[in-house]
């Protein structure tokens, strides 16, 4: 019988040779004692990220390494990992090491202990270790998004989340979907919750985003999600006759 984990940890990575191996070890330590798997999705890195991760498989038997043939972005890498995941609960975190894997089990436990309609528990970063410009841009962006979408989220940019795999697969997919998961879960009639999580300095590599680049993508994405919300119709539940 194939191994059936309770939790799948999905990590998208792109040019993170310096951070990925240590992060994989941290994840394995954080989830020790549980039935889990770790899926790193290499989004066609140009450095030695894939080789560094595959070299760890003997040390970390729960580790799986998936690799895109061409670069497709963070959302597609997350979706690739979630599609391949074998557990009903998925925990995601960024591949740069700024999310603390030690916070992951608490999010997964909060999701599992929640009501049946709870589909996502998102992390909200406290004491963020980013530049002042990045924190200001994030605060403004989160405020605008929350006001327009009513998703109740203060920090959708936090990569650390726990959610039900089947709920994610019901959502309409588009690039940058990972920043709109709370709004899309609410659109499907699910409940969402949030918990504070830690945040760390980046120890290696560099950010793949700029404030201007993120703003340009966010404007079109925000309009698209608003359109999706306007086209949603709630049946109020389903009864089998």
Image: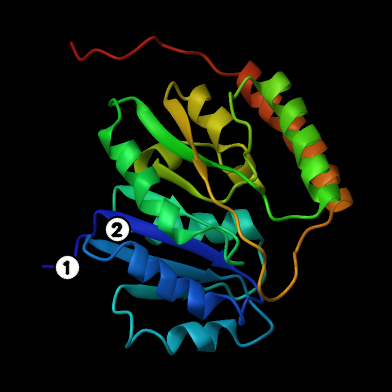
Name which quarter of the figure residue 151 lies in: top right
Name which quarter of the figure residue 166 lies in: top left
Does 126 appear above or below 2?
above
Residue ID at (36%, 84%):
57
Residue ID at (82%, 42%):
137
Q: Which mark is residue 86?
A: 2
Name which quarter of the figure residue 33 lies in: bottom left
Mark 2 / mark 1, whichever is N-terminal: 1
In front of the other: 111 or 69: 111
In front of the other: 166 or 179: 179
Under tag 2, what secondary structure?
A: loop
Label 1 sits on residue: 2
Q: Residue furthest right?
A: 212
Residue ID at (61%, 82%):
17
The residues bearing labels 2 and 1 have C-alpha atoms spaced at a distance of 10 Å
Under tag 1, what secondary structure?
A: loop
Can residue 4 be seen at all in this image of the molecule?
yes
Percent coordinates x, y for residue 40 in the rendering: 47, 70
Q: Which mark is residue 194?
A: none
Residue 135 as seen in the image, left or right of residue 10: right
Residue 59 as seen in the image, left or right of residue 127: left
Q: Residues within 10 Å of mark 1 (few under 14, many from 20)?
A: few
Q: Are marks 2 and 1 in contact (CB under 8 Å)?
A: yes
Does 150 appear above or below 12?
above
Can residue 220 be seen at all in this image of the molecule?
no
Percent coordinates x, y for residue 195 in the rendering: 47, 37
Q: Residue furthest front?
A: 127
Percent coordinates x, y for residue 210 in the rendering: 83, 56
Residue 80 as seen in the image, left or right of residue 9: right
Residue ID at (77%, 45%):
135
Q: Residue furthest left?
A: 1
């Amino acid at each position: 019988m194939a191994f059936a984990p309770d939790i799948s940890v999905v990590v998208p990575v792109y040019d993170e040779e310096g951070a990925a191996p240590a992060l994989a070890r941290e994840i394995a330590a954080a989830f020790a004692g549980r039935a889990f798997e770790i899926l790193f999705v290499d989004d066609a890195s140009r450095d030695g990220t894939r080789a560094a991760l595959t070299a760890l498989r003997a040390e970390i038997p729960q580790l799986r390494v998936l690799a895109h043939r061409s670069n497709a972005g963070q959302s597609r890498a997350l979706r690739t990992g979630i599609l391949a995941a074998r557990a009903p609960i998925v925990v995601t975190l960024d591949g740069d090491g700024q999310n603390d894997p030690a916070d992951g089990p608490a999010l997964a436990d909060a999701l599992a202990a929640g009501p049946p309609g709870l589909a996502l528990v998102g992390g909200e970063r406290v004491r963020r270790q980013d530049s002042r410009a990045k924190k200001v841009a994030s605060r403004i962006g989160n405020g605008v998004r929350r006001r327009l979408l009513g998703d109740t989220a203060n920090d959708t940019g936090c990569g650390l989340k726990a959610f039900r795999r089947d709920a994610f697969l019901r959502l309409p997919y588009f690039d940058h979907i990972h920043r709109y998961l709370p709004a899309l879960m609410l659109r499907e009639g699910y409940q969402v919750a949030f918990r504070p999580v830690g945040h760390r300095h980046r120890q290696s590599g560099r950010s793949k985003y700029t404030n201007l680049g993120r703003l340009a993508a966010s404007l079109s994405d925000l309009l698209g999600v608003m359109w999706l919300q306007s086209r949603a119709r709630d049946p109020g539940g389903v009864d089998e006759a």
